[in-house]
Image (spheres, rainbow, N blue to C red):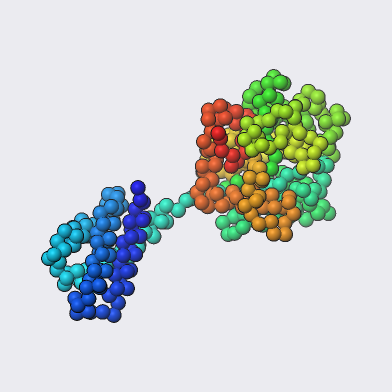
Amino acid sequence: MRHDSLYLTDIVEAADHIADFIAGKGFDNFQQSELLRSGVLQKLTIIGEAAARVSEPLTSRNPDIPWPQIVAFRNILVHAYFGIDWDLVWRAAKNRCPELRNQVAAILAVEASAAKPVRAFERYIGIDYSGAQTPLSSLSGLRVYLSDASGPPIEVPPPPSPRKYWTRRGVAEWLLTELQDGPPTLVGIDHAFSFPTQYFEYHGLPLNWQKFLVDFQRHWPTDRDHLYVDFVRDGLHGDAAARSGNSRWRRATEVLTRAKSVFHFDVQGSVAKSTHSGIPWLLYLQRNLGVRVHFWPFDGWQIPAGRSAIAEVYPALWSNAYAREDRIPDQHDAYSVAAWMRSADVRGSLRHYLNPPLNEEQRQLARYEGWILGVQGK
């Protein structure tokens, strides 16, 4: 079924053609040219046919246009072609069509404005994370890009300091400030927010994300100023032995994306280090922001209007869709995250990705395992 906008466009285009046909001509020219009469007649028929197919709700919203009369005129033209009143046809083409054309064009503009998707967010922040060194270390692999309605993402530099790059603590504190009183913002962070079901079962933990955050930070206090992830792994701090995992364990969302396990350490760009160093900062933001920020999907698939949200992202899903230009890989990943989120929101498709078509088992798992934004269920 065609949408009303297509029938309205048919009317506007047919009226424009009629105006072109009769431009600079009088009734005598019209009456003497069979080709001209046939062309005008065919376009008037299209106008009547399109008017007959416009939906009742739209015609009711626009009673100033005599829809029934337009349809009736079309029926006369089609079924009484042997006795057509060409003077009447001329007056319709010359006088009525321009007026109708402008009325319908105005309706099209109103309908298009009403159908334009309303963005859920005003800003989009993409973060390519790094688990290297300590929370106070200046990390070239930790990049932040921000986009708003005005244009493509731009890189956000760290606050002025002797450090050249962002630190993990610096990013967390900046996010706290930005999300505390700022406009509705969607933040995409490139590390896992939780662990696979096997982890919860192996350690006898409740299937609850909030309790997981507290328990994890207690055993893996990687948010301490001078602490390396490896210090905890090696048993020098914390209690990693009591909360270890297996690199064969993967979350449902990781299986679908073929992403590496959150316990896959000792490889370049390890998501395991990023995850183990980043999760305590999620707890920090949750404790300090409370209900002002929505952790998706743990707080629910639907994000309340006007609220900022933080979601896990996987830049590999989108990075190839954007030209690399002069950005290094870490910059490009953060750029791609912000660009895709903004584009999806502007198109009106972001709401679909925030409530993906998952089966019931996947939805239950996502309540405590988390989910990667943009991943569709199977």
Which of the 4 quarters of the picture holds residue 366? top right
Q: Quick one: 211 or 297, which is closer to the camera? A: 297
- Residue 284 showing in the rendered view: no
- Residue farthest to the top, as pictured: 204
Answer with left or right where residue 88 lies relative to residue 22: left
Q: Quick one: 264 or 63, which is closer to the camera? A: 264
Q: Position of residue 243 (x, y in %)?
A: 76, 25
Residue appearing at x 64%, y 54% in the figure: 322
Q: Position of residue 53 (x, y in %)?
A: 28, 52
- Residue farthest to the front, as pictured: 35
Answer with left or right where residue 22 lies relative to residue 303: left
Position of residue 319 relative to residue 256, above or below, is below
Q: Quick one: 106 or 245, which is closer to the camera? A: 245
Position of residue 8 relative to residue 142, above or below, is below
Residue appearing at x 67%, y 32% in the figure: 194
Q: Position of residue 75 (x, y in %)?
A: 18, 58
Position of residue 222 relative to residue 347, above or below, is above
Q: Quadrant of the C terminus?
A: top right
Answer with left or right where residue 84 lies relative to residue 44: left
Q: Position of residue 252 (x, y in %)?
A: 63, 31
Position of residue 11 relative to residue 216, above or below, is below
- State how many labels appear: 0
Residue appearing at x 16%, y 72% in the figure: 87
Residue appearing at x 35%, y 50% in the figure: 2
Answer with left or right where residue 129 lies relative to residue 67: right
- Residue 207 showing in the rendered view: yes
